[in-house]
């Protein structure tokens, strides 16, 4: 595994739409593992491929619920409820802000073994999934902040 360089707000790659992954092969698995390592090294709970300069629909998440999610082509099928909470982003260092997200989502994706999965997520995991999928569409949490951004 290897650390990848993070891209930061202002880098135009973060505003581009990522492409679907046709197959989760060894190359994508290496990308996923590198992204997990990069996420941990930077104390993040999630990371999307464009944040390391790759415009592919791949995200990784670990909200410390005992599982590391590696997802290709994640797609939200249904969402329910609402939660408002503070978010930050490894690509927008030292800023946080309040963002409204669904409380629950059902997401389908392709896992690291190229198998289709469906996951019901709630709370912080649902928030992280929405945040990371936004990255795949060129959206940053700062676009969705309800109140003023908090500078740390
Ligand atoms: Zn982010």
Image: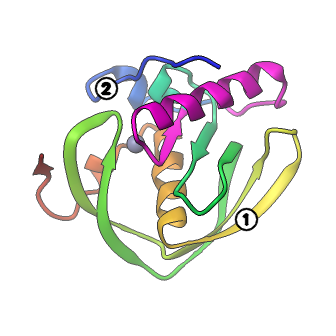
CA distance for labels 2 and 1: 29 Å
For the point 22% across and 52% down, the residue is 96
- Residue receiving disc 1: 119
Which quarter shows the N terminus?
A: top right
Q: Which mark is residue 74?
A: none
The x and y percentages for residue 64 are 54, 58
Q: Is residue 24 above or below residue 67?
A: above
Density class for disc 2 (Cα within 10 Å; few <14, some 14-19, many ≥20) is some
Q: Is mark 2 within 8 Å of ligand 1?
A: no
Q: Position of residue 43 (x, y in %)?
A: 40, 41
Q: Is residue 27 left or right of residue 64?
A: right
Label 2, secondary structure: give it: loop
Q: How many marks?
A: 2
Residue 41 part of the magenta-drawn span: yes
Q: Secondary structure at mark 1?
A: strand
Residue 23 appears in which quarter of the rendering? Answer: top right
Residue at the spot x=31%, y=68% of the render?
A: 85
Q: Which residues are magenta?
A: 20-48
Is 136 rendered above or below residue 125? Answer: above
Q: Quadrant of ligand 1?
A: top left
Residue 143 in the image: state x and y as whole percent.
28, 49
Question: Which residue position is annotated with label 2?
Answer: 8
Q: Is residue 137 visible?
A: no
Give 32 or 15, whichever is nearer the viewer.
32
């Amino acid at each position: 595994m290897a650390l990848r360089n993070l891209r930061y707000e202002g880098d135009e790659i973060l505003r581009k739409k990522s492409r679907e992954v046709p197959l989760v092969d060894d190359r994508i698995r290496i990308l996923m593992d590198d992204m997990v390592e990069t996420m941990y090294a930077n104390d993040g709970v999630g990371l999307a491929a464009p944040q390391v300069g790759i415009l592919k629909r791949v995200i990784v998440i670990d909200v410390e619920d005992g599982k590391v999610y590696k997802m290709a082509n994640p797609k939200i099928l249904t969402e329910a409820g609402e939660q408002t909470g503070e978010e930050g982003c490894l690509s927008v260092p030292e800023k946080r802000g309040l963002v409204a997200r669904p409380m629950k989502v059902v997401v389908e994706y392709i896992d690291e073994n190229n198998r289709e999965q469906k996951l019901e997520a709630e709370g912080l995991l649902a928030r992280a999934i929405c945040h990371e999928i936004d990255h795949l569409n060129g959206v940053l949490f700062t676009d969705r902040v309800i109140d003023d951004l908090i500078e740390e």
